[in-house]
Structure formats: structure tokens, C-alpha cells
Image: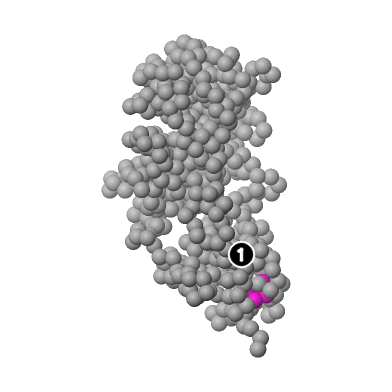
Amino acid sequence: MAKSSQEILHNIIVEKVYNETISEYNEVADRDVKWVMDFKWQVVNKVFLENYAIEFFETIKKAGYTRIQIGGLESTAIPIVWALVLLDTENIICNSFYIRKSKKKSSLPNLIEWEILKDIPIILVDDIINSGSSFKKSQTILQEKYCMEISGVFTALRFRDMPYYVNFHEKSIQVWSIFELHDFGETLGLKNIQEKDKNIIQEDKYTIYKTNILCKANPYIVVPKSAPLLNGKNIYIGIDDGNFLCIDKETSTIVWSFKVLFGSDGKRILSSAAIYKDYVFFWAYDGIFYCLDKHTGKIKWTYIDADWIGSSPCINHQQWIVYIGLEFGLWRKKGGIVALNIKTGKFIWKNYDTMWECTHASPAYNHKHSIVVCGNNDHCMRAYNAKDGTLLWQYQTNGEIKYGAIFDDTRDLVIFGSMDGGLYALNMSDGSLYHRFNARYGFYNNPVQSWAVIYAGSLDKVIYAYDLDTLETVWKYETSGRIFATPMIEAESLFIGSNDGRLYELDTISGRVNAVIQLSERIVNTVQIERNIENKRIIYIATHACELYKAREL
């Protein structure tokens, strides 16, 4: 007697998909995983796809659909989508597409490949559904880019009980699966995943508004861009087309704009702004440092010396000095640091003799020790006398230092990340190593500190919490995308964006995820947070695509 499609698929999952030989994976990813369901080979297996299609079309017809369009998130969903299209003998599928996890950094920067038809139900397909985050991201992209909702999701295997997917049910989205883990209890000893505690991630904790599309973004620059700066009733930010904007936070209207006309390699403004009294400062890739009136956008003064500037300004409030890192296109002169008078723009000191590569990193000033530190692409972190620019010490890492540093005055430490995967803590007095914390890949952002714990996101997609006293990792949490964004601590929560388009709110003590805000584009910068009169958070989020969002806590 011939086996049914469910029997064939069940045998494939038991014999080919279920995998316990993952010790090397555990060691690299540092996960407590005993098994995985690896469908990668099966989504190019004719037998699997034919029987998946049988179950899919039976389910769709029972649900009453006669015309649908199907899609999925790369990459596993792509062969499933195409197989269903080819095996559709009744012409139920009238359109298909796939969604990229993020825009390509070359060629056409599309998020969705192929078009979406209006008024035709959308069914998303994949191999498994666990937390459902991939489907939620796809849903967000379809909502924002096409104002379309999804009608259902279909997978071969569901990891959790149906009530877990309450966010889908509340939006009338059907969740179908051929199997759940319970179906492999006898053969593999599996059961559906249960939450370790009652704290379910809140995905409706915030109401999200897209307040501005600031300009047509440059999608090929995948690094931290100009971060929003909240000051009083306005937000200040530089965008890809060269405009530096002052935006009213309540109405989202542009109060004033200042245009940078030139740049380099498609870059105009990557510098994040700083404010001192009535002055707002930023640098640009035309090599000019700008000081503007923060109320009107009129130029107060400019400083011209560098070829390009991607660094962000650092202010010494006590002595009215602003510090910045510079980049040059000369063979023997590539990087430097300069100190300027805040009111006049006249240079107080400059040091162009100690940095051997470009200085994309931003300086950081410490009042207690009267030093300025700045990293460089030559792998070194250097400390300078804040008053005269004398080099005090330097420390060599094994990778470029792309971003800034923070200070721990309790332990007299300077702390920063390197592209070699190290988060370094150095003694401020002489630059000697206090400790190096390790990630799998580099750091391209600033760490933040609360008490003895340092928080940082890495290009290995992981958020780390390190204890400076015990020198242990307190907790870690893995996202689904590389992390360029600098974290923000507000009350007992850590907020950090990822290239997966999510802003995570984590408990600073335990690392537990309290809430997630899913957007359609990468989040590569820190956010800004304030409280309203009801003591509820308002979060301002800028995306890689030059979009500005406002999230209100409910």
C-alpha cells in the first residue's frame, strides 16, 4: 500500500532532517542546543517538495481559497515558493515573490523581489515556525511597503502550541503546519517547546508611527549613519542626501535644513551631532566641520582642514573645546585629531603625526584625567593630553577601531570595541590592559555601562553583558542580524537595534527580552528616549533607509 504524503514527510524529517551531530555548532555559537531540524537539503529534494505541495494545496482548498499569492523570506522559502508554483495544477497561485532579509549592498537594493498584487490573499511559506519572528518581519515589510496584510502562514513543522501564536490569531492570520514537535514524541522523544516562565515577549507594548521618510537613502553604506539627537522640542539628524535637519518632535515637520553639497564615494553626513548651548556641531565627508545655530540652522563658523570626516564631535564642556577625528587622502598623512574652540572654531591644538591610517572613530573626553582618547584604522587606541594634544600612551589591538570609547571613573578604565572581536578595558593612567572580553566578530559601535556591567552589540549578532569586577559574561542574547547600533539604557531596560530590523528592549539584569519593535529596515544607530506626562516612554528610531519612527509606550 502506498504511503501517504504525511507518512513520507514524517519519515524524511526523522531520517534526514533531525540532527543531533551539532557539537561543533554548539561550541562556535555557545548555545545549549541538543538537536536541530535542518531542512536545507530537503528544500531542494524533489520528493520532499512534491509531498509538501500536496499538503499545502489540500490545506488551502479546505480553507476555501481559490486564488492566492505566495511568498517567503530568503533563503529557505525560495525553493519552496518556486516548487509550489510549478506543482500548482489547479492554477490557485496567481502570483509569487520572495522577501530579502535585508537589502543587497550591490546591484538593485530591493527588499521584495517581484511585484505584489492588490486584493489577492497572501500566504507565506517556510520550513518551520518557532517564535514566528521571520513571518512577523515579512508581515511588517508587506504592511509598510505595500499596505498589504497576510492571510496565513504555512510550514512543515511547528515548534510550539497554537495558543503561543496569539499575535497572529488576533490579526486573523491563519497558522498552518503539517506537523508539530509532539508528532515526533514516539520516534524522537520530542515535545512542543514551552516557555521557561510566563514572561512572553510583548510585541504590542508600543504603538509605532512612521513620522518621516527623510530622503532617498543610500542603501550601499551599511555602517552606522548619523544618529538622531533629541534636544528640547527638536530632533537633529544628518541624512544621506547631504541635508542636516532640525525636526519638530511633535509635528514631525522640518524646522530648518542645511545642505552639504559635496561628499566622497556616496557619503555626505555620517557624523552624529553634538550640542552645546545654542550651537549644534557635525562633520561631513566634504571635509568641513560645521557649527550651526541650533534654532535657525545658520552657520556660526566652519573649520576646513581634512579631506573627509566620518567621526562624530566630542565636547569638553568645562573648557569650551570640541574634539574630532580627521581623515586625509595623503600617502603619509591619513588620520589625525584636532581640538577647536567652541565659540570661534579656532584650533587649540592638532596632532596629525601619531595616527597612521584614517580616523573614522570618534574621540572621547574624560574630565577626571584630562585626557582625550581616539581609535584609528591602524588598530591603535591612543590617549592625548586634553589641553595640548601630547600623546600620552597607545594600545595596539588586532583590528581596526571604528567607533568611540566610554570611561569608567570608578575603576579608572577606558572601554572600547575593536574589529578583532575584542571589547577592551584599559587602565586610563598608562593604557595597560585591564581585561579583554571576547566576541566571535568585531564591534562597530560604542559600549554603554550601568554599575559594573558593560553592554555592547557585536557584528556576530549577539548582545553581550560583561561584568568588570568578576570579568565574566553576565548574559548574552543573539539577534537575527549584525549589530551596528549603540545601545541605550533607560531605567532598567537596554534598548538596541539590529540589522534584522528589530529594536530590542532587554532587562539589564537578566537579559530577558521585554519587548520587540519590528521595522522593515535595518536599525544601525542608537535611539533617543523620553517620557511623556504619563511617564510612558516615547522612542525615536532612525533606520538605515533614512526613515524616522516614533514608538509610544502603551
Is 62 located above or below residue 460 in the figure?
below
Tell me where residue 64 appears, x and y as whole percent: 55, 81
User: Magenta segment, which residues?
Assistant: 49-53
Q: Amino acid at mark 1?
A: Phe
Among the 4 quarters of the image, the one containing residue 55: bottom right
- Name which residue lies at 38% across and 51% down: 512
Q: Main secondary structure of the magenta part?
A: helix
User: Seen in the image, is 95 located left or right of residue 123?
Assistant: right
Tell me where residue 158 appears, x and y as whole percent: 51, 69
Q: Nearer the viewer, residue 355 or 189?
A: 189
Residue topped by disc 1:
39
- Name which residue lies at 62% across and 55% down: 100
Is 219 colored magenta in this rendering? Answer: no
Tell me where residue 345 appears, x and y as whole percent: 49, 16
Helix, strand or loop for disc 1: loop
Q: How is the image coloured?
A: one colour
- Name which residue lies at 58% across and 71% down: 14
Q: Nearer the viewer, residue 430 or 368?
A: 430
